[in-house]
Image (cartoon, helix red, strand yellow):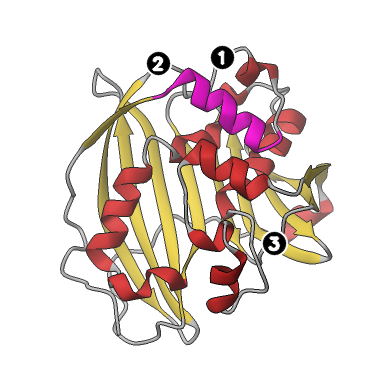
Amino acid sequence: MAVALDKLGTPLDEVTTTIDADRAKAYAAATVDDNEAYTSGKYAPPVFGVVPTWESLMVSNAAVIPAEAMLMVVHGEQDMWFHQPLVPGMTLRTRATPFSVRVGASGTRFTSRIDSVDEHGDPVLEIYGTTFVRGMSDGESAGPDKPDHTFPDDARSRPAGEVTVHLPEGITYRYSDASGDLMPIHLDENVAKSVGLPGIIVHGLCTMAVCSQAVVRTLADGDPARLKRLAVRFAKNVFPDSDVTVSMYEAGAGAYAFEAHSRGDLVISNGRAELER
């Protein structure tokens, strides 16, 4: 079993959505983020950008990944470029393009490029979302390399801050309601165990939202409009009722490297944040 390569580089159908103010607030609450910029309705959280673009990502995945492999899918990496801050009421026109496939011994990584523009056609979001299909090692690699966000080793000598956030029991249900991500491995313990997981796991994008909270609070003076890029690799599973500690380091020219740990494990690696200075 392997992914289909014939759709690579072909833009898929455009999807139009509007950022809903109440849903943006619910997303902030579900990711344990009480930033006044979100509770007041001024902005939507940066990682909320996955919500209005979710349908496009699912269409892209369905075009390339065999249906029988969908229960073996987890989020591998996410790289979000913010050309404008996300504002409730903003209408987005989004188009996904299957971008690249990389086959490895433990599975296959499929990257979609997702581009969103506003009602005037101006860029808002550029996302490289990488889906990892566990155990799928057949087929060939194809397509261009996605943008790099490798952690620079020398950044460890320049710590910039550390934030710990507790993810309560039941967070996966609240995140599912707010985000629309209903993958059963986050909601049904029996399903999670049937595909080799120890139990329900927290959505990777929920953990990424925790990282964005740490970056915005510590490095951007609480202003999410200053965040221009946020990229992560999902290194290991996070579980409900756990602390997530995000450690940040200066990487030069308004850029920061970060990583996150939970229950002693490195759960987010190769984190990169870029801020408007």
Q: Secondary structure at mark 3?
A: strand
* C-alpha span from label 1 to label 3: 30 Å
Confirm whether the magenta stretch covers residue 52: no
Residue at 40% of width from left, 58% of height from top? 146
Relative horizontal placement of residue 12, taking residue 178 as reference (left or right): left
Q: How far apart in space, not on screen, are marks 2 and 1 (Cα)? A: 10 Å
> Tag 3 or tag 1, which sits nearer the N-term?
1
Give the amino acid type for the residue marked by disc 2 in the picture. Gly
Quadrant that contains the C terminus: top right
The residue tagged with tag 2: helix, strand or loop? loop
Residue 191: x and y in percent read 54, 70
* Foreground residue among 274 and 100: 100
**Magenta span: chief secondary structure:** helix
Q: Amino acid at mark 3?
A: Val
Q: Nearer the viewer, mark 3 or mark 2?
A: 2
Residue matched to label 1: 41
Q: Which residues are magenta?
A: 19-32
Q: Residue at x 48, y 49 (%)?
A: 79
60 relative position to 218: left or right: left
- In which image quadrant can residue 254 be found? top right
Picture disc at residue 89:
2
Q: Residues within 10 Å of mark 2 (few under 14, many from 20)?
A: some
Percent x, y for residue 220?
69, 27
Residue at 26% of width from left, 53% of height from top? Answer: 59
Residue at x 21%, y 63% (from the top left corner):
8
